[in-house]
Image (cartoon, rainbow, N blue to C red):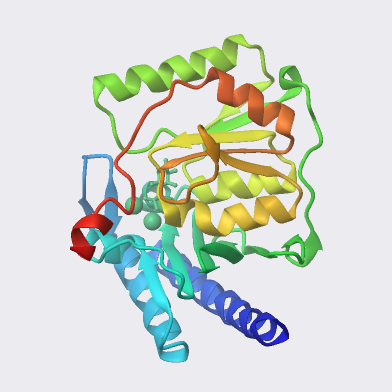
Amino acid sequence: SMESDKCWQECMDVAVQIARRAGQMVREAVKQEKRVSTKSTPADLVTEADRQVEEVIISTLRERFPSHRFIGEESSAAGEKCILTDSPTWIIDPIDGTCNFVHSFPMVAVSIGFAVRKELEFGVIYHCFEETLYTARKGHGAFCNGLRLQVSKEKDVSKALILTEIGAKRDPKTLKIFSGNIEKFLSAPTHGLRIIGSSTLSLCYIATGAANAYYQYGLHCWDIAAAAVIIREAGGVVIDTSGPLDLMSRRVIAAGTQEIASFIVQQLEPISYERDDHDVGAQSL
Ligand code: IPD
Ligand code: CA
Ligand code: CA
Ligand code: CA
């Protein structure tokens, strides 16, 4: 309706302001000494800044929109349930690319997605060091610093640049599957493969046409929510390895064209991960 249309636009304007403010916090924090600890594995890093930025984003939004729900990476790590209901829900990654942040490798973003009735309405991603802002609203196009985005129309895989991410799981079985996948893409042949250390920015580069496809296993809903809207509104394809995108499934394939997406699907080994909303059943008991 017109009413909700106006309402989601207002939410998106607030998201843009907060993303910029969060980006500023990241630019300041990267110069300070970082307090780094680990979560699920020695490669799964978290810093004080991750928690502080998420706290600022969520408390600001909650004050403004008290009836909304929130999913955030560090709140989930602290035990909050990760459930997508029909209520307006903000899905937040305060610092995407924490390992990059720790090393001052300049590929770090703030990602804010927004869903209503489980459908993504808009996404905002802010590249903290480049100060580029990616935005999209369902039905209204995707933009980078106000310029309209369009995915690459390339259909030929042999001319494709492919992006992926390794994730923090480094056990021998996972590594074997990951390296097997990489080997397939390098022998396919393609133009090449890149790993930049930020899933949200990798997805933004599909939206701009700078790369042709991106795939990853083991990522979370806050890595995909905002970017999925941006890619779709730029004319691209975002799917799961086994069908339509399922935000909670921990798998994603994004591509400029259906042809390239289908090629990636054929290559990938199917791996199952524990879902982001795995504890929903237990909670509703
Ligand atoms: C991670 C980064 C990384 C990807 C991981 C993500 P974080 O996000 O996007 O590139 O490989 O799967 O979890 O932890 O830095 O927000
Ligand atoms: Ca993390
Ligand atoms: Ca992330
Ligand atoms: Ca993060």
Quick check: 39 left or right of 67? left
Among the 4 quarters of the image, the one containing residue 60: bottom left
Q: Quadrant of the N terminus?
A: bottom right
Quick check: 98 left or right of 201? left
Query: In the depicted view, which residue is nearer to us: 200 or 226?
Result: 226
Q: In this view, does 181 lie above or below 20?
A: above
Count the labels in the image. 0
Q: Position of residue 224 (x, y in %)?
A: 51, 51
Q: Position of residue 141 (x, y in %)?
A: 77, 62
Residue drawn at x 19%, y 57% as measured from the top left: 282
- What residue occupies the far top of the structure in this picture? 187
- What residue occupies the far front of the structure in this picture? 285
Residue drawn at x 72%, y 38% as measured from the top left: 256
Q: Is residue 280 above or below residue 100?
A: below
Quick check: 178 left or right of 75? right
Residue drawn at x 76%, y 48% as measured from the top left: 235
Q: Position of residue 156 (x, y in %)?
A: 77, 21
Q: Is residue 33 visible?
A: no
Q: In which quarter of the image is the C terminus?
A: bottom left
Q: Is residue 163 above or below residue 206?
A: above
Q: Position of residue 135 (x, y in %)?
A: 66, 65
Q: In this view, does 6 lie above or below 213?
A: below
Residue drawn at x 44%, y 72% as measured from the top left: 25
Q: Can residue 229 be seen in this view?
A: yes
